[in-house]
Image (spheres, rainbow, N blue to C red):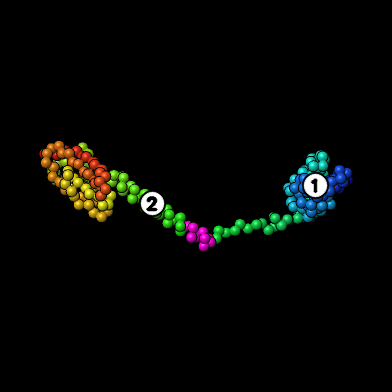
Amino acid sequence: MRTVGQILKEAREQKVYTLEQVEKAIKIRKELLVALESDNYKKLPPPTFVRGFIKNYASFLGLDAGKLLAIFRREFAEDRHKPYVMDAFSNPVETPRFKLTPNQLIGGVVVLIVLSFFVYLWVQYRGLVGAPQLVITSPQDQMTVSDPNLEVIGKTDTEVKVLVNSQEIQVDSEGNFKEQITLPSQVNKITIDAISKFGQKTEIERTVYLKR
């Protein structure tokens, strides 16, 4: 019985194709075609690849790929034909490790400086056009107390002036403030203003009921 390699070689020669023409047409290297036609499986990659070679080669020559693959399965025994390991499989290309070059380092520093500059501009812009933040933790709105002495506690931005009922109170370096006031009546409206050095203002009102 003729082998797969003999059938492929005879068909190629009948159609007057050179190995170079086949190589160009089906993208299989000439040395692999030679090994396939000579049934030299030791010079070929594992069977999975060989089956693909046979299928493409048979299709190009107009042969029945199914019959050729059946012959290949009968004649090929992995215990007798150790497949050839191609260089591409035995010596895979190593992925180069990342290496920081001086140019990359300088570029990174420049990018960091530029980003820092824009962040600074954004903070300055917010300070110029944005009203300061103001958080009041005490008293709560609509609360009722029995002691006329009440603490106003809160937090704002740094370098901000805080007024409680139009009276300026002390603010620490982190924007925290605490001030004790006296409730004059049963229904008391407390107004807290935070005013930036550029004149922007945030105002919060609290209504506190004094139970006598």
Residue mark closest to the camera, 2 vs 1: 2
Q: Tag 2, which secondary structure? A: helix
Q: Secondary structure at mark 1?
A: helix
Q: Residue at x 78, y 55 (%)?
A: 43
Which residue does the image show at 55% across and 60% down from the upper left?
99
Label 1 amino acid?
Val
Q: Determine the residue located farthest toward the bottom in the rendered image.
A: 102
Q: Quadrant of residue 210?
A: top left
Please say whether residue 45 is visible from this viewpoint: yes
* Residue at numbered disc 1: 22
- The tag on residue 159 is none
Q: Which numbered disc covers residue 119?
A: 2
In this orientation, which residue lies closer to the viewer: 24 or 125?
A: 125
The residue nearer to you, when weighing 170 against 111, is 111
Give the quarter of the figure containing the C terminus. Answer: top left
* Amino acid on which the number 2 mark rests in the picture: Val
Which stretch appears magenta? 100-108
User: Where in the figure is residue 61, as x and y percent of width and height?
Assistant: 82, 42
**Label 2: few (<14), some or many (≥20) within 10 Å?**
few
Residue located at (16% from left, 46% from top): 167
Q: State whether residue 136 is above or below residue 82.
A: above
User: In the rendered structure, does residue 10 fall within the stretch colored magenta?
Assistant: no
Cα distance between the residues tagged 2 and 1: 63 Å
